[in-house]
Amino acid sequence: MARIVVLTGAGISAESGIRTFRAADGLWEDHRIEDVATPEGYAADPALVHAFYDERRRAARAAQPNAAHRALAELDERMPGEVLIVTQNIDDLHERAGSSRVIHIHGELGSARCEECGRRMSWTRDLAGRPACPACGARALRPDVVWFGEAVYALDEIFGAVAQSEQFWVIGTSGAVTPAASLVALAAEAGARTALLNLEAHDDVRLFDEVVLGPATTTVPAFTSRIRETPRAPRDPGAAPPSRGATGVSR
Ligand code: BV8
């Protein structure tokens, strides 16, 4: 289990030059979600969907981790085994920054899945040319990402970690997608201290003990530097959970 669980979204990679989804210049501005991020869209036009993800795989490979990714990796190094990152992002910038425990709840650009034999495999090339599956030879490889209407990855493991966490931070996400967006309510219910670090406030800020607004490369290093190696707080099962509600919105 981890004392600190961090949920990240597209906003933490924005300053690495990777487009977010719902900003004015966002990814979804170029495409309808239904056309590029659903199984139905893939069935209707696989070439369009492969082009969408091949371009994002190349962009992610050209991007570099930023100070926010690095700050989380440094915290991980300072508190071995105590920090778990659950990311909605399909890039690998957390890993490339050095974070050791990363769960990709929505899959990864660096992985492909064979629709014939079901194998998931590390993948770095384009899929538009419909290469053969290395395992079974079928030309049935798809991006190993979770589309809308598909089950997300590792949800039981994620629920377990959030329920045991002492701190739950949400960084760079609009909270528009479930079940990822529901994790903060589970953390609050479990008595974890919750924080939102985002460019703009969410509708559900009341669920956060602390809200820090600003760009992640500024807010995350400052926030993680506050975390000193503190002894594990004895969890008193009878204790009432800490009072809820944002204790302050710092800009
Ligand atoms: C499921 C992977 C069940 C691919 C993604 C009605 C009809 C149908 C379905 C639903 C419905 N209502 C709810 C649903 C469920 C649906 C859903 O939530 N839909 C939404 C749109 C309403 N969810 C699902 O379908 C999920 N599956 O429920 O399955 C099931 C169960 C069992 C068996 C079978 C089925 C699957 C959801 C996963 C979808 N895949 N991506 C890809 O990446 O292309 S979601 C996609 O959105 C990305 O993963 C992305 O990460 C995610 C969330 O977006 P954000 O990361 O938050 O990005 P966004 O642009 O929105 O926000 C960026 C934020 O960063 C902003 O707040 C901004 O202010 C901030 N920011 C910007 N710059 C900075 C910054 N912050 C700090 N610093 C900066 N510099």
Image (tube, helix red, strand yellow):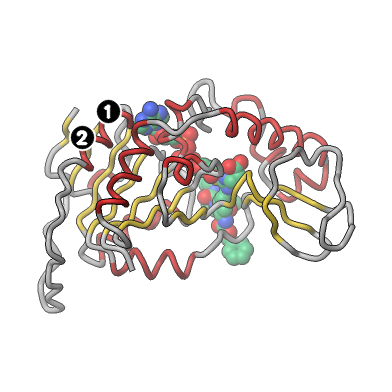
> Residue 189's x, y, as percent?
26, 65
Q: Residue at 41% of width from left, 39% of height from top? A: 174
Mark 2, residues whose alpha carbon is within 10 Å: few (<14), some, or many (≥20)? few
**Dot 2 amino acid type:** Ala
Look at the image and tell me in which quarter the C terminus lies. top left
Residue 150 appears left or right of 101:
right
Quarter of the picture holding the N terminus? bottom left
Element under label 1?
helix
Q: Position of residue 8 (x, y in %)?
A: 40, 45
Quadrant of residue 124 within the rendered picture: top right
Alpha carbons under labels 2 and 1: distance apart:
7 Å
Q: Position of residue 249 (x, y in %)?
A: 17, 35
Q: Kindly tell me whether mark 1's CB lies below 8 Å from ligand 1.
A: no
Residue extending furthest bottom?
238
Q: Are marks 2 and 1 in contact (CB under 8 Å)?
A: yes
The residue to which callout 2 is attached is 222
Q: Is residue 119 left or right of residue 189?
A: right
Q: Residue at x 33, y 32 (%)?
A: 216
Front residue of this view, candidates 148 and 15: 15
Q: Is residue 241 above or below residue 19?
A: below
Residue 31 vertical placement versus 76 (above, below): above
Near mark 1 (Cα within 10 A), the count class, few <14, some 14-19 or many ≥20, is few
- In-image side of 114 versus 243 (left or right): right
Numbered circle sitting on residue 218: 1
